[in-house]
Amino acid sequence: MVAALINGKEISLSIREELKLGVTELKNQGVIPGLAVVLVGNNSASRTYVNSKHKACNELGMYSEVIELAEAVSEDELLSVVRKLNNDDKIHGILVQLPLPAHISEKKVIETISPLKDVDGFHPINIGRMMTNQDSLLPCTPFGILKLIEATNIPISGKHVVVIGRSNIVGKPVGQLFLNENATVTYTHSRTTDLKRITKQADILIVAIGVAKLITSDYIKEGAIVIDVGMNRDENGKLCGDVDFENVKSVAGHITPVPGGVGPMTITMLLHNTLKAASQIENKSNLGVKL
Ligand SMILES: Nc1nc(=O)c2c([nH]1)NC[C@@H]1CN(c3ccc(C(=O)N[C@@H](CCC(=O)O)C(=O)O)cc3)C=[N+]21
């Protein structure tokens, strides 16, 4: 068997076309959805991501602002920037790029963002709403993964989803999201014993570890859907995932590439969340697009 490719770039584009209609509709009602991205310090990878978010916003006709702060900015200064954005009527979504320098508490920053403008879906209120199956702003990467699997038309209900990784921004919320879709979910992580025994039972395997090409075909059940959240550089400096793509594609049923898989979907769901936040904040819930 050779796995079918789940093309995140293409799926992203078709979702963005749909979002464009929602943006137009809001504009006709006098609202321009606005996103603020806060970048602290001079990490070049972070800058690349922030630029693609900015560009994607503009392509959709949204307003977007990038606020750059020095690496040495104090926690208080950053918190006051966030509070100002909370009160800025042009801004419906706030994203503070992570990781932050060690002298700043990410927890404090996230908890200062208004839950209404929390387009990352990281605020404890939004996490709690997701856990209790209430409507909320969903974390972008998990939400994007859900959309990638929906695009295969394979039903999720009753499937065994195995997640490798337990971060607050990917592993934990993605398991919760699939539980909400009636999957049976197993979490595994760096202390899991006999990882392969568990991953081999996965109908859907979601890999978010951060180690280049760790997952080979001997971890995979024949025909499984394999979602690669990894963003690493290989020995030649080339972007690669946590999954050894060439090796796994002969066993999996469906597989996401890196680049062109989960990454573009993360940005697309950020755009989705910004549109949703704008329509909720402005009380315009009758958008033609289902959010
Ligand atoms: N508050 C916050 N929210 C985030 O959502 C967030 C963050 N902090 N910090 C960093 C991570 C990383 N992240 C990516 C988004 C898109 C791609 C992406 O589009 N990747 C392209 C390749 C890009 C390239 O060529 O370098 C792809 O996979 O095809 C990657 C990584 C969002 N993050």
Image (tube, rainbow, N blue to C red):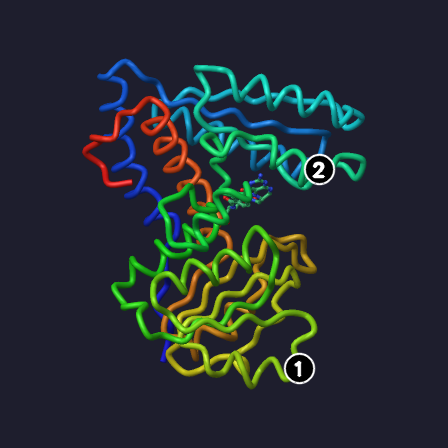
The residue type indicated by label 1 comes to Thr
Vertical arrangement, residue 65 with respect to residue 170, above or below = above
The residue type indicated by label 2 comes to Leu
Name the disc covering residue 273, or none: none
Q: In this view, does 14 lie to the left or right of 72?
A: left
Residue at the spot 37% in from the left edge and 25% down from the top edge: 281
Residue at the spot 61% in from the left edge and 67% down from the top edge: 213
Comparing 89 with 71, the one in front is: 89
Residue at the spot 64% in from the left edge and 29% down from the top edge: 39
The image shows residue 262 at horizontal and vertical percentages of 46, 53
Q: Quadrant of residue 158?
A: bottom left
The image shows residue 146 at horizontal and vertical percentages of 38, 56
Task: Give the secondary structure at mark 2.
Answer: loop
Whether pointer 1 and pointer 2 mark residues with C-beta atoms closer than 8 Å, the reply is no
Q: In this view, does 53 lie to the left or right of 183?
A: right
Q: Is mark 2 within 8 Å of ligand 1?
A: no
Name the quadrant where ligand 1 sits: top right
Vertical arrangement, residue 164 with respect to residue 63, above or below = below
Q: Mark 2 highlights which residue?
A: 100
Q: Mark 1 highlights which residue?
A: 193
Question: The C terminus lies in which quarter of the figure?
Answer: top left
